[in-house]
Image (spheres, coloured by chain):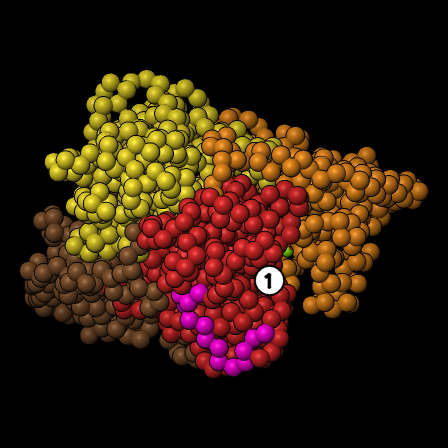
Chain colours: A yellow, B red, C orange, D brown
Amino acid sequence: MTVMTYAEAGMTALAEEMRRDPLVWAVGEDLGRGGVFGQYKGLVEEFGPERISDAPISESAIMGASVGAAMAGTRPVVEMRFADFALCAVDELVNQAAKARYMLGGQTKVPMVIREPMGMWRSSAAQHSQSLESWYTHIPGLVVAVPSTPADNKGLLKAAIRADDPVVYFEHKNLWGMEGEVPDGDLLTPFGKARIEREGRDVTIVSWSSQLHTASRAAGMLEKQDISAEVIDLRTLWPWDRDAVFASVEKTGRLLITHESVSVGGFGAEIAATVSEHLFKALKSPVRRRAAPRIPISYAPPLEDVVRVSEAQIVETVLEMVSS
Amino acid sequence: MTVMTYAEAGMTALAEEMRRDPLVWAVGEDLGRGGVFGQYKGLVEEFGPERISDAPISESAIMGASVGAAMAGTRPVVEMRFADFALCAVDELVNQAAKARYMLGGQTKVPMVIREPMGMWRSSAAQHSQSLESWYTHIPGLVVAVPSTPADNKGLLKAAIRADDPVVYFEHKNLWGMEGEVPDGDLLTPFGKARIEREGRDVTIVSWSSQLHTASRAAGMLEKQDISAEVIDLRTLWPWDRDAVFASVEKTGRLLITHESVSVGGFGAEIAATVSEHLFKALKSPVRRRAAPRIPISYAPPLEDVVRVSEAQIVETVLEMVSS
Amino acid sequence: MPGATPRNIDVARYLDHHRMMHRIRAFEEAAAKANEDQLVLGAIHLSIGQEAIASGVCKNLRTDDYLLSTHRGHGHTLAKGADATAMMSELLGREGGICQGKGGSMHIADFGVGMLGANGVVAANINIAAGAAHAIKLKGDDGVACSIFGDGAINRGPFLEGLNWAGVFKLPALFVCESNGFASTTRTEAMTSGEGAAARARALGVPADEVDGNDIVAVDETVRAAVDVIRGGGGPRFIVCKTYRLHGHTASDPAAYRPRAEVDAAWKNDPIARCAAVLREAGIDAAELAAHRDAAATEMNQAYETAKTAPWPDLALAYTDVQDIGDPRERAF
Amino acid sequence: MPGATPRNIDVARYLDHHRMMHRIRAFEEAAAKANEDQLVLGAIHLSIGQEAIASGVCKNLRTDDYLLSTHRGHGHTLAKGADATAMMSELLGREGGICQGKGGSMHIADFGVGMLGANGVVAANINIAAGAAHAIKLKGDDGVACSIFGDGAINRGPFLEGLNWAGVFKLPALFVCESNGFASTTRTEAMTSGEGAAARARALGVPADEVDGNDIVAVDETVRAAVDVIRGGGGPRFIVCKTYRLHGHTASDPAAYRPRAEVDAAWKNDPIARCAAVLREAGIDAAELAAHRDAAATEMNQAYETAKTAPWPDLALAYTDVQDIGDPRERAF
Ligand SMILES: Cc1ncc(C[n+]2csc(CCOP(=O)(O)OP(=O)(O)O)c2C)c(N)n1
Ligand SMILES: Cc1ncc(C[n+]2csc(CCOP(=O)(O)OP(=O)(O)O)c2C)c(N)n1
Ligand SMILES: [Mg+2]
Ligand SMILES: [Mg+2]
């Protein structure tokens, strides 16, 4: 175990995989100077500018060329800088990377990792703050990862690099500096296996990415009110760990999903719909969601905070749930 | 009333609005020869090539220039040809059109209609068949329309053109030739008002676009088995008519949502989650969804049909629901 | 008949070209017939009149070189070495289809011969080819990645991004623009500002040649020289092949938006007839050339017959090759 | 000091330029101070060293002409006529902010003076400006729409699509590339294939000039000539202004990736000093020029003081101006 930041964990994962497999390479703007959040720092010194490759401001080409490079036998790690900018390369991701294997009758796979730093990062405003993870869960062919801890950012990134599927890999900008214990060596975290962040009896709270920590803090507050919340970190949204969620809800009878992204059309809806259908009888109260209102993200902090789901809101919702 | 096709109804709507307002114009590839589905036929003769404008194969520019043209006082109707190709212009739609008004502090509106022919159209395969309406419901600032009949294609398109918001307007390729009665003159169908396609007592089936007709036929089959299904056509997904859906489910106690798009992360999940939460006690059986499996769309008809939700599947699901 | 080209040709090579061009023509005619018979399922785009480009480009590529094509890709795919019956079966969506019936005409591919896919999205293949070239360079191989696209594609952003990418990274990439005058129903010149594809390529630092795309000799020689440079580490090259789309945009498009006389004149410039003329001048017998045509027709009619009688693909295929991670059969509703 | 320019200048005009350039510089310095004070909330990108472009372009635009800018847009916005206090309040996210505190630095706009927005997405403003020009043409107005963007933006697809669009439709559009040598931490030349922005523009049928962007006289005259042509119906024009980004990419970037000597040399080419030299040569007193600087500093320090003491925006604003249709307050969870 080593204590390191979420950014360092990602860096460690990439470096380990690049050492292991010469076909792994990374490409994106400003990688040669360490990347915009420092998450590639020092890598060019070890691996050289061909494998830690700068790119022109050409998101379509970064994504599209990586599709071709993946088909032709390499394993690109694509840096999109902000998840928002990946919207400049959606054809390449959704029409090409996700579908090529299927359309071409299984003649190829498209092993690539698309790193999309996501989420609110104080006052980045509407074009630098989005969380669009639910979009990609809707696209056959794509895997979606949403690590919330340094350990998972190592283990999931390594697994993503080794996967033969295109993996949309959302790191949260607010977590770069978060420190935590990270297992040394070949940590490969499986996709579709949730992590129980905290055990509990009265209510299940499902979350992921940065919001998981808000949920966890809310659970701490609930404990003081003698409400025992089980907090589940999904880690990946496609596949997502139904078994873990179902097992927990069967125990608690109550489910709240909370995420940073917009509630309408968010992945919370998918979970709520699935659980409401399959555990209809086990539910003691309706499945609830707490997520962002359907408004763009503002620059001014008080307005931005309107979009954030707070610990207090989670507590409030859980109180409603347990008393209903 | 006049009997006309869904395509003609769209054409009529556009022509009427262009006659009414000289600031309305349409732009897209091949419009001068009537558009790829003939849905602009004859319009260039009446309005000239400046207002029924051809475009280069430049989806980013078609969308992005229309954002600028909308800010600068005109009302562009943007033709994307296939919803799939709109993925070449997502930044322009999601980061620009949808957010400009908000980010710029209300200094502008972005009145534009983005026509995106959607859905399966026999053997068009994975890059020409997608239904991604749920994506845009997730984006603050956007309106999403999904007309299922010629009358609605007139009334909703006219309303969309008059709206000051960017409206993502999904016409279904399979419906172009569908005939129906269309009211003459100024038909303006409000957003967020569902249409009761068929009244019923035992179960509510919610759908939209082409799949609505499958739902309706399924309801006919159910009637023969003495099950009375109420079929609701949402017409628009954002806003969506909760009042109508809630009222119906309060009456029937059962809800099935069916749509052509992929089930995971589809808009059915949003409806299911919302209804499961708010009508928890009124529900006699769990809310169900029947939608596409999470696989790309094939070319060969039997494989393509695996993605289609049939009348039989809807009937089967409803039978499960009423007997549970 | 236009097109005086050097007559000092490698006869065997041009016999190959002639054979291949006839195979492409015959394939497209069989596909058109299948389309009339309503056995082709989706839209198909015929390359009749553009055969010299497919043959001229692909003869200069090795099997392990990569090719990325467009919606109008049958000819490219055949010329790269794919099997006609497997291709025809794909158009008919049958078992034995080259993509198992899952892709159809616009997604035809044969990785066994380096053909990494047609594409339903205009210009999308440009970046993919640049990336395939990038992989070649990273692996230290001596291959070439080639992208063929239309004159309409030069108005999409990926044209700029892909060419700049290939230039910046000095990649072994060959870009070929089939300038056939049309993008669907629209004359490309009406929607293109400036001097066109070659000027744009040059401005992006990719040296460009322009050739008569109906002259197999010109195409072959220009491509050969470009591929030599590319394989020698000289970086990307661009070739514009001027041609004419003799049929409609799709096999079902009557193309009524252009004057009959224009099309008639273009037929006089048929690249196959021009290739035959070159070979006749080099002393080849008319009968031998006619035999190419007949053999091609026989092959492609047989391909069609075989495809026609093939069953639909196994239903289980609907759920295969989606992705490794996560079970697509998992009930999601 | 470099930059011999014709001395037969309109003194009043260049006094205006000098005043404006100082205002821009002082605004950026106040913003940098605010950033150090941790009162600026998001990332800001300073245009120090590039003031001649902002002033030179905008002086040749009418208030009702449109301007679309980038992440580095403070100077453009001021030069187009926006109020400095409202801008500074926006940077601080306060009430009175020019976008009500909802956009911040990268989304600054002032529709009252034709400034239709900075943009957080590189190159996105190019198509938007082409569209604004399209609207002008459709309405039969005689306005001009101008887009200013960086040398990094020329590698994004919208550059090609927007310029081609403006060329095809012969739109009244002016494209200005601020070639400051960098895109974030990367030297743009390393990521640019070919001869650069002007060559690309020409290949896209948009006539292009290249000027010394630190020479206010050259910028002013080149822009004036271009705007005359555009307003006269001559179609789009392109101008590359060569300059240097004197500060880091953002106000918090120490820009350690470039040698100190290079930056020092670039400071010797300060466009404001060069403008002052031109005016001194034309007989203007040093004291008058110093007064410009002092007035600008006073104005911008005052703007900062005002912004600092302004309250946060009203919370109700979070839910306004989302869209007309559908209620954003509707509980969605
Ligand atoms: C991004 C995108 N936009 C539009 C289309 C529809 N489309 C298919 S082929 C075509 C014309 C292409 O013209 P060109 O590139 O010249 O190729 P050609 O058909 O002439 O071979 C168009 C517009 C598409 N497939 N992809
Ligand atoms: C599409 C997109 N990709 C990447 C970025 C991140 N980014 C912001 S500014 C910048 C550099 C832009 O360079 P240039 O266009 O030369 O403008 P300058 O900063 O030099 O004024 C980059 C890469 C972005 N904002 N948008
Ligand atoms: Mg063409
Ligand atoms: Mg720059």
User: Foreground residue, C172 or A318?
Assistant: A318
* Residue A19 seen anywhere in this rendered image of the structure: yes
The residue drawn where x is 47% and y is 32% is C326
Mark 1 surroundings: few (<14), some (14-19) or many (≥20) residues within 10 A: many
The residue drawn where x is 33% and y is 73% is D65
Q: Is residue B214 above or below residue D285?
A: above
**Any magenta on residue A180?**
no
Place residue A7 in its image quadrant: top left
Q: Main secondary structure of the magenta part?
A: loop
Secondary structure beneath label 1: helix
- Residue A123 screen position, x and y as percent: 21, 50
The residue drawn where x is 19% and y is 51% is A305
Highlighted magenta segment, given as a residue range: B181-194
Place residue D130 in its image quadrant: bottom left
Q: Is residue A160 above or below residue B223?
A: above
Amino acid type at circle 1 is: Leu
Residue placed under numbered mark 1 in the picture:
B175
